[in-house]
Image (cartoon, rainbow, N blue to C red):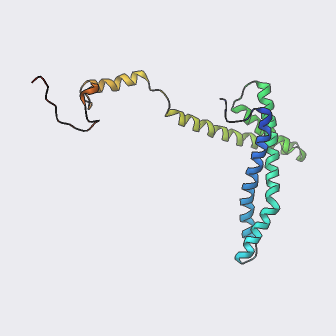
Amino acid sequence: MEEYSREPCPFRIVDDCGGAFTMGCFGGGLFQGLKGFRNAPQGLGRRFAGGLAAVKARSPTIGGNFAAWGCVFSIVDCSLVHLRKKEDPWNSIMSGAIAGGILSARNGVAAMFGSAIIGGVLLSMIEGVGILFTRISAEQFRNLDPQTDLATAGSFASGSGAGSGDINSAPGFGFPVAQQANATS
């Protein structure tokens, strides 16, 4: 399963890091804005000022944390693609687990193990949903079975269909029309 919309591996690291930073800034800004609005003193002006102050204080930090995770994830993903010589969902799942473990290395082995499990489980759920959507959307483009086509064509040929199997026997594009008289009679 090759993804044609992604950059090649050395450039993918910078692309994923920037995308993760942007996602962290917007998501963190939204969350921190709501949190600052809720925790500010009474008055609409004070609440908006509190929300804006919280966004300015915490949103870049959350974006930086997301960027660090995206960078480590992408480095591990590119390394696994190079080592395994194939690009499949297992690379992303293992990259999520390894990135979670690496980023929590300062907190000890137990925290590394727990973060690695959480990273692997989250990425396996994301990849599973992606595979599910791919299979659901691929059903509409699947070629029909020739045996099924013959069975449905047989019902039209027996006279139960509107055109009785003949291409030109139903003029009017499916609308009922009166029988035309033969030109010879």
Determine the residue located farthest toward the front in the rendered image: 183
Depth order, front residue of 13/39: 13
Q: Residue at x 82, y 62 (%)?
A: 57
- The quadrant of the image that shows the C terminus is top left
Q: Quadrant of the N terminus?
A: top right
Tell me if residue 95 can be seen: yes
- Residue 23 location, x and y as percent? 73, 50
Residue 117 seen in the figure? no
What residue is at 80 percent from the left and 33 percent from the top?
10
Above/below status of 154 relative to 108: above
Q: Could you tell me how many numbered marks the image carries?
A: 0
Looking at the rendering, which quadrant does residue 151 occupy?
Answer: top left
Residue in the foreground of this view, choosing between 61 and 35: 61
On screen, residue 164 versus residue 96, left or right, reads left
| Residue in the picture at 72% in, 69% down | 37
> Left or right: where does residue 73 sit relative to residue 168?
right
Residue furthest toward the left? 185
Identify whether 122 is placed above or below 10: below
Q: Position of residue 8 (x, y in %)?
A: 75, 32
Occupied quadrant, residue 109: top right
Query: Residue 116: image x %, image y %?
Result: 79, 41
Left of 123 or right of it: where is 109? right
The single residue placed furthest to the bottom in the displayed view is 43
